[in-house]
Image (tube, rainbow, N blue to C red):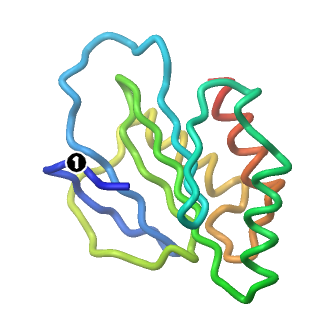
Amino acid sequence: MSFVRNSSLTKTATGPIHFRQGTGNTKKAEHRMITLKIGNDVREIRRKTDVDESWINRQINARRADGLSVCVQVTIHDADCDVILSTPGCGGGMGGSRQPNPSERAIIDLWAKRGLNNPNFTGGNLIAFLHQLLKR
């Protein structure tokens, strides 16, 4: 997954959150684009039925069983939000200057509320986050 030019990076207490600079889009997008990446495997999430709970749990549990760190990245893009959230297993990054807008802040708070800043998060934490995100 590549980040767009002019992106900033803000480091949270446990993992990086990337904010992309303005999209220039002033209308609310019809559909939020959500990309879920676990390790090297990527899935597009557009509706609740795209959240494959079995696949998510298999990916996370298999990596832990193999002694690997679990890196999950969720990219969210619409007219109000352009953010990449990462679990602690993805490693850190350098700080940036842009502050999250209110829509991004609400998503970041939900990420934290669902325990995804904790290295011992579960597939259930991620699934709950995605389901709640899709209700917004």
Instruction: Please provide percent x and percent y for residue 38.
Output: 61, 60
Q: Is residue 34 left or right of residue 123?
A: left
Q: Is residue 128 left or right of residue 86?
A: right
Query: Which quarter of the picture shows residue 43?
Result: top right
Query: Which quarter of the picture shows residue 24?
Result: top left
Query: Residue at image x 53%, y 63%?
Result: 40
Q: Is residue 69 left or right of residue 30?
A: right
Instruction: Please provide percent x and percent y for residue 99.
Output: 30, 50
Query: Residue at image x 64%, y 74%?
Result: 70
Q: Which residue is situated farthest in the left direction here?
A: 6
Residue 59 position (above or below residue 132) = below
Query: Residue at image x 21%, y 52%?
Result: 7
Residue 106 position (above or below residue 40) = above
Q: Nearer the viewer, residue 41 or 69?
A: 41
Query: Which residue carries the number 1 mark?
Result: 4
Number of labelled discs? 1
Instruction: Please provide percent x and percent y for residue 92.
Output: 41, 78
Query: Residue at image x 64%, y 34%?
Result: 133
Which image quadrant: the N terminus?
bottom left
Is disc 1 placed on a helix, strand or loop? loop
Callout 1, which amino acid?
A: Val
Instruction: Please provide percent x and percent y for residue 9.
Output: 29, 62
